[in-house]
Image (tube, helix red, strand yellow):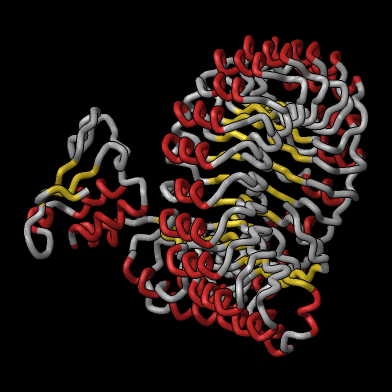
Amino acid sequence: MRHRNSYVLSKKTLDAPGSGALGWDTGFMVVRIRYGGGGGGGMAALSLDLLGQVLDRVREPRDRKACRLVSRAFARAEAAHRRALRVLRREPLARLLRAFRALERLDLSACASLDDASLAAALSGADLAGVRRVCLARASGVGWRGLDALVAACPRLEAVDLSHCVGAGDREAAALAAATGLRELSLEKCLGVTDMGLAKVVVGCPRLEKLSLKWCREISDIGIDLLSKKCHDLRSLDISYLKVGNESLRSISSLEKLEELAMVCCSCIDDDGLELLGKGSNSLQSVDVSRCDHVTSQGLASLIDGHNFLQKLNAADSLHEMRQSFLSNLAKLKDTLTVLRLDGLEVASSVLLAIGGCNNLVEIGLSKCNGVTDEGISSLVTQCSHLRVIDLTCCNLLTNNALDSIAENCKMVERLRLESCSSISEKGLEQIATSCPNLKEIDLTDCGVNDAALRHLAKCSELLVLKLGLCSSISDKGLAFISSSCGKLIELDLYRCNSITDDGLAALANGCKKIKMLNLCYCNKITDTGLGHLGSLEELTNLELRCLVRITGIGISSVAIGCKNLIEIDLKRCYSVDDAGLWALARYALNLRQLTISYCQVTGLGLCHLLSSLRCLQDVKMVHLSWVSIEGFEMALRAACGRLKKLKMLSGLKSVLSPELLQMLQACGCRIRWVNKPLVYKD
């Protein structure tokens, strides 16, 4: 805040260390920097390095902006000192790249309408010699020409993220191959990349250490074999969802430095492939074979036999039975294994007893495992007292006795997932809340817990994530308990907690100021008054309000005005939301990227104004907008063309919208999902 002739940064704003060059105090101390008139006066006497150290300790972007506005010296310090930049719009990109000359990390993943021409123009003349990491995830408008310009402008480039650029193919891969110093590359869901493109990359970038080829379905055993021969420094590899077979694992086994291997849903891989992998270099520390249908515990046993330094093993939704050979070999990992996921497996108490021999486990995944009982959990946690993450989703045989065992033995647990464990109650949660002070996340979805349970959980002052979906017994009273003590909460799920009213939201807004993600879908007692309370949650980014039939544009205006950081809002089946809500979003929610307005009472005028105003908007779902004419859809989509990446609309519009518009959207990289849903109203 500004105070007379000083600029004051409170302890809330500063990440104050115990001591330092600027003499920070460890109490509720402030840094008061005096300024004179004009260009900054007293602050001009401080070096850019010192002012840069101040900015490094300012956590919030708005506070950094306030510093820049207070003094030109701060602005110059940030320009000389800033290392990372995330750009939301392409228009200021060129100016920003010229202003910040010390950049090392550049994130363009949310830069709406970015294409080859705009990227090349922005890069031209900018000094990016220090840039090492660039994120272009979902930047579907950028092709090989833009990547050519990027590689030329950033000679020290070490990491590029091109994930979910579904149109990227071999020409884009060839452009990246010119970055000879590249060490990390993500081509996840670059659907056009084939063995030819991969060959270009591995020949041009032999120093690669981390590579993701997830969903690159055109890559075969041939490409993986060449990768294994050329990139000897590879430490992390993701080949999930590829149609590669055992021959790829034979090639991968020759990589002497490989530590992490993910092969989720590789249906052509079986036990023979795991045996080949097990005979390779003993360097693997993390293996993910989840959803590999032809992998059994016998294959995993042979893999463990050759890799006795494994730290993480994910076999979720792969195994159908647990053989003794696997359990015997698992015992060899008792000193190293820290993460084990066996979701979807039939697990007896004797199996959990054997797993407990790996007493250094910090994470166990038993989601949807049949046969998990109180006795089995007790035998596991008695030996594994270091567990911090426990996933017992849908283990519906468990009772409060299991929670008592966890509370008694695993006092450092941080994440506990108990969705659909319907036999637990407030008594078991009381033990957890009392004995586990570090609890940061708990999922009680569909557990039927009540306000008494929340009174106990309120003891967990470190709680960050609380999921209470389908807990219809939760009321405003329970929310008041949480709000009174859990001030660090950042995510709250109240899906179908239909006893929650505006009073509960008032308590929430008063005590949980840091909430970023809030789900209120089907909480149908909430009105505009409740949304008015939410307007005070300045850090809110994701808000789900589906089927809140009592809210109108007035409530949406309150949220839009107060929640300036809003990124995603879901208004599906909010039947009374009209153009007033859209106008407010268009004026205030300038960072909005994802919007669902299906079944709302908006018109073509409101829709056109919204889509033309929000420069960051990329994903819009608008099904059954009965008050919008064909001309209204046409104008609105033309106004947003070039920025939208995803659309969801009724299939009937496909034949009435102009072919020119649809071709234009497709050319700009927008993917349209056409759906055929009947107009059914729900309460």
- Of residue 487 and residue 160, the one placed in the foreground of this image is 487
Locate residue 241, reporting x and y percent.
80, 53
| Point 87% across, 18% down: residue | 348
- Of residue 279 and residue 469, the one placed in the foreground of this image is 469
Locate residue 416, reporting x and y percent.
65, 27
User: Seen in the image, is 225 located left or right of residue 149?
Assistant: right
| Point 73% across, 85% down: residue | 657
- Of residue 669 and residue 361, the one placed in the foreground of this image is 669
Q: Quadrant of residue 577?
A: bottom right
Does 654 sit above or below residue 347? below
Locate residue 585, reporting x and y percent.
49, 65
How many numbered marks are there? 0
| Point 41% across, 47% down: residue | 536
| Point 42% across, 72% down: residue | 93
Q: Is residue 338 visible?
A: no
Q: Is residue 593 visible?
A: yes
Q: Quadrant of residue 649?
A: bottom right
Does 100 sit above or below residue 324? below
User: Seen in the image, is 510 located left or right of residue 671?
Assistant: left
